[in-house]
Amino acid sequence: MSDALPADAPSAADVAAAAQRLAGRVKRTPLHCSQQVDERVGARVLFKCENLQRVGAFKFRGATNALLRLSPEQRARGVVSWSSGNHAQALARASREQGVAATIVMPQDAPAIKLAATRGYGAEVVLYDRQTAVREEIGRQLAAERGLTIVPPYDHPDVIAGQGTVAWELAEQAGHLDLLLVPCGGGGLLSGCALAAKARLPGCRVVGVEPAAADDATRSFKSGELTKVHEPDTICDGARTPSLGRYTFPLVRRNVDDMVTVDDDAVRAALRFLLERLKLVIEPTGALAYAALHSGAVQAKGQRVGVVISGGNVDVAALGELLGG
């Protein structure tokens, strides 16, 4: 895949428009800070708590923005997508609120809390086996058979613009930042936040953070060649996407300053610290950005740092095992 930017790729102006469109429809999530964190990393750290967003993740922003951009005909026919969990819940709830039927393709081993929530919001869930089927193919087949509009989990201009409102808000709340750390799976959140940061936070470096076992975006960013990692073995289920996409690949290449990785042990340590010291319940993918600081993979001494906590939909019953006992 080329890293040429598609003609209809989103811009900072699209993020600004999405911010206006979403006003009153999504939560303006709070910033959280901690003297313990600041002392540990030697920086002023401001957490953007999207774990407190509706449906517990930033995905509600992109899903809502994409649905609001549909034509009346598309809304009447319904939408389809695929997701391991957070986009599924977000699209399901946003669709229910806007009176649009939603069908979501989800893996059989998706976290139980995310399957239950998606069904609870009224969406039809179509399960598949990660080992024998390709979710995108199932979604496209359903779209063709039923006349549904595809709302992808990350690689779509309206979804990316909606996700970018996380950093758009953060800039309004935090003022100047030297560094912005953002989790990366398929790159929708990272792409949108980088667009917003370059427009609203002059001089701010944007760094994406991936699981070490799912480092496709990091390798793609550094090599300029799209790299895929299929079904990576990581506790960060929201970052198991095989690669960046048609839009997110060039946007990350153009607007992100660096990419780093952290292993699952670093994520566990960050999760435990945030839960015990800051009382924040976060899912593994949501802790990626802070894990980079906590582990020392990113040094930010003396800087003002924004850290995006992307979601909090962790299976509480499995939390002890997830944290290592």
Image (tube, rainbow, N blue to C red):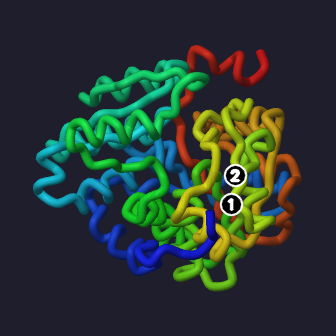
Closer to the camera in the image, 242 or 31: 242
**Residue 191, labelled with which disc?**
none
- Residue 186 lies, in percent from the top left, at 58, 51
Q: Quadrant of the C terminus?
A: top right
Q: Residue at the location (37% across, 26% down)? A: 117
Q: Is residue 274 left or right of residue 62?
A: right
Amino acid on which the number 1 mark rests in the picture: Leu
Q: Which mark is residue 181?
A: 1
- Rendering quarter of residue 118: top left
- Which of 269/112 is in front? 112
Q: Which residue is mark 2?
A: 289
Q: Quadrant of the N terminus?
A: bottom right
Crowding at dot 2, Cα within 10 Å, few <14 / some 14-19 / many 20+, comes out as many
Q: CA distance from mark 1 to mark 2?
A: 5 Å
Q: Is residue 70 visible?
A: yes
Left or right of 18, for residue 45 = right
